[in-house]
Amino acid sequence: SKNPLKAVAEKAAEAVLGPEGPEEGVPGKPASATPPVAEPTTPRDPLPPKPDQTGPATVSPTGQPTGASQSDIAQGGAYLTDAQGTRLHDTDHSLKAGPRGPVLLQDHHLREKITHFDHERIPERVVHARGAAAHGVFRGYGSAAQICKAAFLGKDVETPVFVRFSTVLGSRGSADTVRDTRGFATKFYTSEGVFDLVGNNIPVFFIQDAIKFPDVIHAGKPHPDREIPQAQSAHDTFWDFVTLHTEATHHTLWNMSDRGIPRSYRMMEGFGVHTFRLVDAEGGTTLVKFHWKPKLGVHSQVWEEAQITGGVDPDFHRRDLADAIEAGAFPQWELGVQTFPDNPEQTFEGIDLLDPTKIVPEELAPVQPVGLLTLNANPSNYFAETEQVAFHTGHLVPGIDVTNDPLLQGRMFSYLDTQLTRLGGPNFAQLPINRTHAPVNDMLRDGMHQTAVHRGVAPYRPNSLDGGCPFLAGAGDGAYVEVPAEVAAGRKVREAPASFDDHFTQPRLFWLSMTPVEREHIVAAYTFELGKCYEQAIKERALKVLARIDTELCEQVATGLGLPAPAAGEPLADPSPSPALSQVGQTWPPDGRIVGIVADAEADLAGVRSLRESLLESGMVPLVIAPAGGKLGTGADAVTVQRTFATARSVEFDAVVLAGAPARGADALGSRDAKAGDAQSSAATDPRLLLLVSEAYRHGKAIGAWNGGEQVLTAAGCPLTAPGVVTGDGATQVLDEVTGLLGAHRVWERFPTTL
Ligand code: HDE
């Protein structure tokens, strides 16, 4: 079909270049030896918006639907214009007095273009600066209706959502796979207003009172003199703080566990952390803790893998989320609640529900599912959506209220305050990503970046000039009414309750709930992080803290640091372990797992093709890795290469299979006199392939080989009889076994454990 823009473009080209095209020496055109490229080139049809990239249907602050109207579309019309819509005939040359200048002050287009560019960046978030987000939908199961009147939890009610995942410490440009807590913030655009569940992937926090937030963050951020290290907790100031301030012990232990290095945002749990109060239709209240349970299970990288990923693909988690959604493998989580009676003490089984350094083990209070979250659309524009989204713990809907957790109370103040600076004024609720889907009729007026055109003359209450409008709603009309909870009478104090003093029972509970391999990982993480500290006194203090969690943990870390282990403190009564805290031992669907298939033209290409098809059918992602790019084989049966030895690194794959013993890539480094066909000698195998296989082996990944691929495994030092190493006669058998192994995420038996 004829491109409708072509005629326009041809006319535009003629206007700029004349009917004969570019001419040397035309004023405003560079006179150069090489003829300038004809600009503008024929535009192609605009790319159709991807079905998964349409933003949420939104309403304006005055309640009008937006999105379809011309004024909301950022780009329209065939011609380049300035910000006022005036068409431009040149945007490559400043207006000059002659081709060699000087540049004239009157060039408004130059100034508009440059000043806008100068102000493109806004301050990054003071914490959680690095993030990735997606649109989706939440469907209520109706199971919460007994305890919560919020409309979005009703049976089969579908609510649009926007979810932003983040790291905490790093800057906006830092790597995804650092050891850190992850943010898990969800904006529900409900019919009753916006509800934000601003959670993390770790169910406890470093501090019990918001007043200490600047302290813990200053300690974790880079040192103020050299501004290093970036996005790391492995440095003196962090460990100085958390060892002096033992209420941080529990959260720190979670960070040192595999939870601190998730495999994917899709494979993380989320937690509201604080206890919230739900209200039913009769006004009855229940205390709850919110949980997000990923359908794919909770999985992590191993530390060496995470470190390599940080360099090889710093966008690993961001890419993983966007790729999965684009491929239609929509990530899903169930929202669940642990429920507790709203008793005056605000405790459950002796656990203080207002202390955000404590969990309630799932074995004591099971997580009851109340709805399903599906992320099904990537943002269209990172800045407009992911960067400008503003979450707030105070964005609540009728049926959900806060408790007196002093950490939550401080957060109720902080988010709006920080957003005033970050988003440049008080009107950020009008940004498309932040707009509620419920009608807005507020009396907030004016301010920086006001985009609403408000009607009426009486933005105050009571009024008679606007007929007394708008009216106040009662609880029966869906108004948000705070729960009239009792406030304890007493003196004003700067104190915490005595129950907040127990800093070690729950770290011990966590430690006791880990399997041996998870404990090994924790020991290795502490040894690494403390090994990066310079101050001897901090390491020694950290060991004293560890001694209070577990003697063996302390001794092993001490050995790694080359320091004496301090004497164990008073033994605590052992709490019962909570098996739900372990990530090992269950089987999960292998959906979305990435399997690298190593091949070259001599490999079993028919096997590679059938393997690819089976993997795709079962929801996994096959990626063919070869010595060089292009195709393997010829004709209709040719296999497309997706990664080369130059671009592939083991960390990208959950499993690696070899369909032969590929030749060295022409660009391989290292000894070149290796004998062709002698794959068993490591000199004959491409060193990058050896690295790929040996890393996959070391990181406990499933590995398979047939058709001579076994020789490469041997050359890479990967024993054919080791657990999780599959060899066989053909692709089908290897695939079946590898898929089975992926259900457990990793070949855990491959990690030697002494604990
Ligand atoms: Fe936040 N936190 N926080 N936080 N937080 C912010 O708000 C704060 C805390 C969390 O993707 C900031 O808009 C205080 C716990 C997430 O945009 C800021 C305290 C939990 C995100 C802020 C906490 C969180 C933030 C920075 C201690 C888990 C990213 C930018 C009382 C339950 C949201 C912004 C996004 C962001 C303050 C503690 C989760 C400064 C004062 C506990 C997921 O307002």
Image (tube, grey):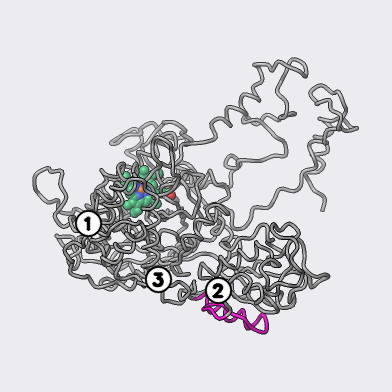
The residue where tag 2 is placed is 702
Task: Judge by depth and name the residue closer to the eye, 645 or 614.
Answer: 645
Position of residue 722 measured from the top left corner of the image (x, y, whole percent): 53, 78
* SS type, badge 3: helix
- Residue at left offset 23%, top offset 58%: 566
Q: Amino acid at mark 2?
A: Ala
Range covered by the magenta-colored residues = 721-743
In this picture, is 266 found above or below 363? above
Q: Which mark is residue 517?
A: 3
Labels 2 and 1: the sequence-earlier one: 1
- Can residue 394 be seen here? The reply is no
- For the C terminus, the image quarter is bottom left
- Estimate the spatial distance between the alpha carbons at disc 3 and disc 2, rounded to whole Å: 17 Å
Q: Earlier in the sequence, mark 3 or mark 2?
A: 3
Instruction: Residue under label 1, please give it.
Output: 354
Q: Amino acid at mark 1?
A: Leu
Residue at (30, 54) in percent of width and height: 205
Is residue 524 shown left or right of residue 402? right
